[in-house]
Amino acid sequence: MKKLAKFNKEGYVTYYESDECILIPDEYKEKSEELRGVWFSTVVNIDIAKMKDIESYKEYLLSVIKKVKEYKMNTVVFQVRPTNDAFYKSNLNPWSAFITGVEDKYPGFDVFGFFVEEAKKENIEVHAWINPYRVSQKKLKDLNMGKKDFLKTLSEKNFARKRPDLVIETVESKLILDPSSEEVMEFVSDSVLEIAKNYDIKAVHIDDYFYPYEEIVDDKEQEKYLSWKKKDETLSDFRRDNVNRMIKLIHEKLATLSKKVEFGISPFGIYRTNSKYFENGIGGWEKGSNNHASCLQCYDRLYADVYLWMKEKWIDYVVPQVYFDLDYSRPKEKGSLEEITVVKYADLVKWWSDICIETNIKLYIGQAIYRYNNEGNWSNPYEIINQLMYNQNYYNVSGSIFFTYNSFVKEDVASLVEARKLLKGIWKKDVKPV
């Protein structure tokens, strides 16, 4: 084991508000059945362009599988339902406009089905990644449209168009399905069941988008909350319960299948912050992670009670998005030279390891390879390597998933290109941490 030196600074990397140095092993030891995966993002065509013709589209999908094999990865988390639509043959959702540019236009073949079958030939497992609520990715104000006009642009097959009363708007003028609606819960869970029934997949997967990061605008929500709320239930409790019920319903429907299809969640990296970092302990949780009180918590901003889902065994695995530097700090105030430490990668991995041991849930770590740039810690090609080395300290970290596929093919960031070479190296056992 060795201490990890700071990048371009004096001293060693420590845990949050601690003098204890972070230790990493001298070499990477591959674990049996280790998951090495990548998210393949289809929303706004992040990882795949719109189709020009069927042949070149299929060739690109095959090149993705080839690239995954090149990096000795064994899993692809394929985004099949980015905005209440489908990259698969569906009786419930229209073909995605991100395929051809036109919603519900048949692309000429079953995109997801083709990918699953070709991946299987190369012993690559596929997880079907869905977004449960999102209807629009673009802001309606940027489209010069209101909700009613936008919904008319959608396919008649789209649930949002059929049920405009169950679509709500965010303060950023985006649209989501109403999480409090039992009809929405049934529709989303039926969509999941359809995918799981019809495709040879390892798992169904939801990322960090439940209630949106921005606030929602729904005149009826307060009315529903006041009418339906349980004794002493806050609006936040009400929202969390809505998401809880959907997660439980998905779990129950997957359990009806004759085959095992896992259910995984990839939450924002901070579930709840330890109460000791809040004034008078108000706002935190005594079992929470060590990080600054200003950090976003998925429990009270996205209303995702992941810990509950783990305790209740509604999910099979968790992939926290630990998209932070090993040694992160920011200016204390705008323009200030004085810095404040906010959150560190190691503290979060340690916390998730402990909570997964407690709940007996499989743990993979979400890695932010997309963050490489030409400044700061992410200009260090070894940042991601040292993070993977740190993960080795925990026997129950069973692998990593990298966001996003695009970062394995683009060439515009020198540190990223070098990091990819190192990544291949540690899995060949010829790269050491620094």
Image: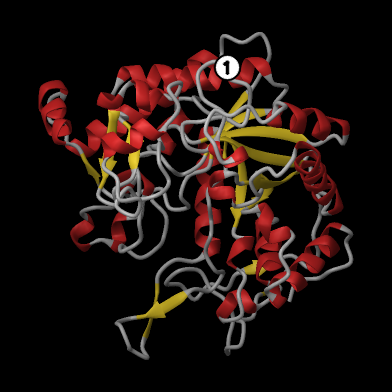
Q: Identify the residue at horizontal 50%, vertical 18% (top origin).
A: 92
Query: Does residue 146 sit above or below 295 in this rendering?
Result: above
Q: Say if residue 245 shows up in the picture.
A: no
Q: Residue 261: give x, y in percent of width and height.
A: 64, 22
Q: Give the quarter of the figure containing the N terminus.
A: bottom right
Q: Residue at x 40, y 23 (%)?
A: 159
Please name the residue shown 85% across and 34% down the image.
Answer: 123
Task: Please give left or right for residue 303 compared with residue 396 in the image.
Answer: left
- Name the quadrant containing residue 107: top right
Q: Amino acid at mark 1?
A: Glu
Percent position (x, y) of residue 209?
Answer: 43, 42
Residue receiving disc 1 = 194
For residue 307, above or below residue 274? above
Q: Is residue 138 left or right of residue 59?
A: left
In x, y percent, where is residue 111? 70, 31
Left or right of 249? Residue 434 is right
